[in-house]
Amino acid sequence: MTGHAANGQKVFGKRKDPHRVIIARGDHVRSFTISPWIAGAATAIGLMLAVGYVGATAYLVLRDDIIHSSSERQAQMQLSYEDRIASLRARIDQLTSRSVLERQSLETQLEGVLTRQQDLDTRQSRVAALLQKAADSGIRVAVGGPIPQTKPDVADPLLALDAELTGTGIGGTPEPIEIGPDLNLRGSQSETLAPSVGRPAASPKDQAALDGKKTLIESVAGNLQRMDREAHLALDVIAVSAEQDAKRISETADKLGLQLAGATPPQDPAESGSGGPYVALGATDFDARLHRAERALIVLDTLKTAARGIPFDRPVAGAPISSSFGPRLDPFLGRMAMHTGTDFKAPRGANIRAPGPGTVVFAGRNGGYGKSVEIEHPSGVVTRFAHMSRILVKKGQTVAARAPIGRVGSTGRSTGPHLHYEVRMDDRPMNPTRFMDAGERIKPLLEN
């Protein structure tokens, strides 16, 4: 087989051996044989280079799209991560803000409770003084224990609650006004706050402790409110009891025709010039209640002092009445006559006592009265004691209630031993029995 090379040289080779290559250059002829493995390797390398070229070309063509897609995925992941971080931060801020607000609210509530306690302490001292004054006036407000003047020392850094409340009762004179078993003006030193309070910082981790303190503060605030209501109730009871007692004394004196110092005469509503809308008692405040109770006690004490100057007692204890006040048959003349006093049948020498405090304005013999004594009392009433066997006082002498002033006898115009007892107002005889009966009714009010 004859062929032509690229440079015009002839190449001779055998067609039967496809792997033998012959190269002729002029007179020189060269031949070599290509192994099948080498040919295969060369073919494979050529294919790999072709594939690599194609792949490189495709990468260069698609690189921008791949880079853009990867950047978008990374940006999306970053945004999602940032959103998650922002959500967590917002949740943390929300929890922190809630904790701060709750702590601020707790501190505000605590300051409010402390202020209320200080105000309640001041009120309690005023109520305690009024309770003592009421007791001196005979109006007893029973408290389960003594009212303390100072708060107890407490160890709790936030709050201090004391022992369980004791049951108490409350009443006036002479009949008790029942309020119930829960009246306790100071709570027996219980449900009070410490004067200085620590305020620990609250965080989400100790939220349970913060909630517990909040609940405790609310409980103490409720107890303080209840104690305040009970103080109001005590003032109302004192005022009502004092006003009722004063009214009984004043009405008793009015029925006897006496006007006591400190008593206000009742007015006809049509002439009093007063009015206005009705306001329930519960709408009044502490100062108004305290003022009303204080005024009622002052009026009551004034009326009691004045009423003690009225001759209410019996001049001879246990002696029966032998002749009443009013018209009767005269024992000497046997015809109707006015009996200006009351006769007490008693044995000769029995003690005659002053029916009330006063000053002796007469002591000696007085015509048909025989040996007699006259006492002028602070109320303006004059009492006269006649037919005495012995006089134990002198004119101008001051005598106390129930003080001995003489002995029963039968001097003067008398049929036998007895005491002729008169009560006179503006030199007018009054029925002594009315005074003695009135004394029996209001005697419990005047003993204190």
Image: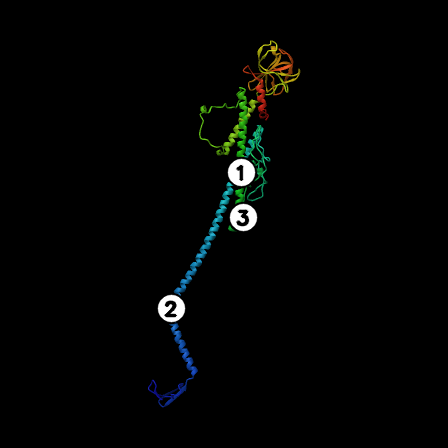
Q: For numbered disc 1, what is the local secondary structure? A: helix
Residue at image mark 2:
62
Quarter holding residue 439: top right
Cα distance between the residues tagged 1 and 2:
84 Å
Residue at image mark 3:
209
Residue at image mark 1:
226
Q: For numbered disc 2, what is the local secondary structure? A: helix
Q: For numbered disc 3, what is the local secondary structure? A: helix
Cα distance between the residues tagged 3 and 2:
64 Å
Question: What residue appears at the point 53 percent right and 39 percent down from the top-left corner?
Answer: 224
Question: What residue appears at the point 51 percent right and 30 percent down from the top-left corner?
Answer: 292
Q: Which amino acid is tagged 3?
A: Ala
Q: Work out whether 114 lies above or below 53.
A: above
Q: Nearer the viewer, residue 398 or 228?
A: 228
> Do callouts 1 and 3 mark residues in contact (Cβ within 8 Å)?
no
Return the x and y of residue 434 as percentages of the image width and height: 57, 19
Q: Which amino acid is tagged 1?
A: Arg
Graded by Cα atoms within 10 Å as few (under 14), some (14 to 19) or many (20 or more), the crowding at tag 2 reads few
Return the x and y of residue 338 as percentages of the image width and height: 57, 12
The tag earlier along the polypeptide, 1 or 2, is 2
Quarter holding residue 242: top right
Q: Mark on residue 237?
A: none
Mark 1 or 3, closer to the camera: 1
* Quarter of the image that includes the C terminus: top right
Graded by Cα atoms within 10 Å as few (under 14), some (14 to 19) or many (20 or more), the crowding at tag 1 reads some
Return the x and y of residue 260 as percentages of the image width and height: 53, 22
Return the x and y of residue 401 as percentages of the image width and height: 61, 21
The tag earlier along the polypeptide, 3 or 2, is 2
> Do callouts 3 and 2 mark residues in contact (Cβ within 8 Å)?
no
Cα distance between the residues tagged 1 and 3:
26 Å
